[in-house]
Image (cartoon, grey):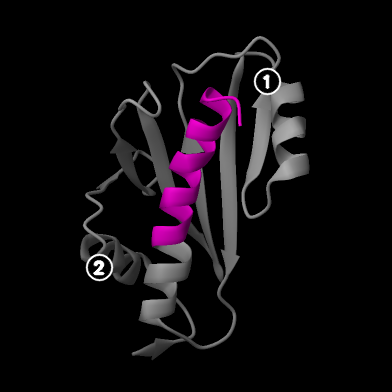
């Protein structure tokens, strides 16, 4: 099926299809938690947000503290594309942000594979890379 706009109901259906269990936060955005494992020992919270034609994924790990998050973010952004790393010096954390502009007709398979699955795995992998010093 091809769509030009994605709404919250369709996003929820696609996340369910990807087997990503979500709940709504206080702002009405869909969120999930990726559990810590041997690659990254902290939980990562992902928010899936819609704003007009934009699908944005924000990934945070509140427990993962860094001495200099801004430098870590800048270094990471120089060598990696696709996901922006933002450093927060006030609390010693970083977060990742990916945005997908969906202003042309695309298939739901495209959204599922190239936005949702890619964005989710890229966010997790980004935390793993920084933790492992890559």
Q: Is there a contact, CB below 8 Å, between mark 1 and mark 2?
A: no
Q: Residue at x 55, y 75 (%)?
A: 102
Relative side of 100 to 27, left or right: right
Q: Residue at x 47, y 65 (%)?
A: 115
- Expressed as whole percent of the image width and height from the top left, the position of residue 95 reads 57, 33
Instruction: Please say whether residue 52 is visible from this viewpoint.
Output: no
Which sits earlier in the primary sequence, circle 1 or circle 2? 2
- Label 2's element? helix
Q: Which residue is mark 2?
A: 13
Q: Which residues are magenta?
A: 117-134
Q: Residue at x 51, y 88 (%)?
A: 105
Q: Nearer the viewer, residue 36 or 94?
A: 36
Which residue in the rendered view is the most extreme toward the top?
A: 67
Give the label, 1 or 2, closer to the camera: 1
In the picture, the disc for residue 69 is 1
**Picture layout, residue 106 above or below residue 47:** below
Q: Nearer the viewer, residue 9 or 32?
A: 32
**Residue 126 included in the magenta stretch of the image:** yes
């Amino acid at each position: 099926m091809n769509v030009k706009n994605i709404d919250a109901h369709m996003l929820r259906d696609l996340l369910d299809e990807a087997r990503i269990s979500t709940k709504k936060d206080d702002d009405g955005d869909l969120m999930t938690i990726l559990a810590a494992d041997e690659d990254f020992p902290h939980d990562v919270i992902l928010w899936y947000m819609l704003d007009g034609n934009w699908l944005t994924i924000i990934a945070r790990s509140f427990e993962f503290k860094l001495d200099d998050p801004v430098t870590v973010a800048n270094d990471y952004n120089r060598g990696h594309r696709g996901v922006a790393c933002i450093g927060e010096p006030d609390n010693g954390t970083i977060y990742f942000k990916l945005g997908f502009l969906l202003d042309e007709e695309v298939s739901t398979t495209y959204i599922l594979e190239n936005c949702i699955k890619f964005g989710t795995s890229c966010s997790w992998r980004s935390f793993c890379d920084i933790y492992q010093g890559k």
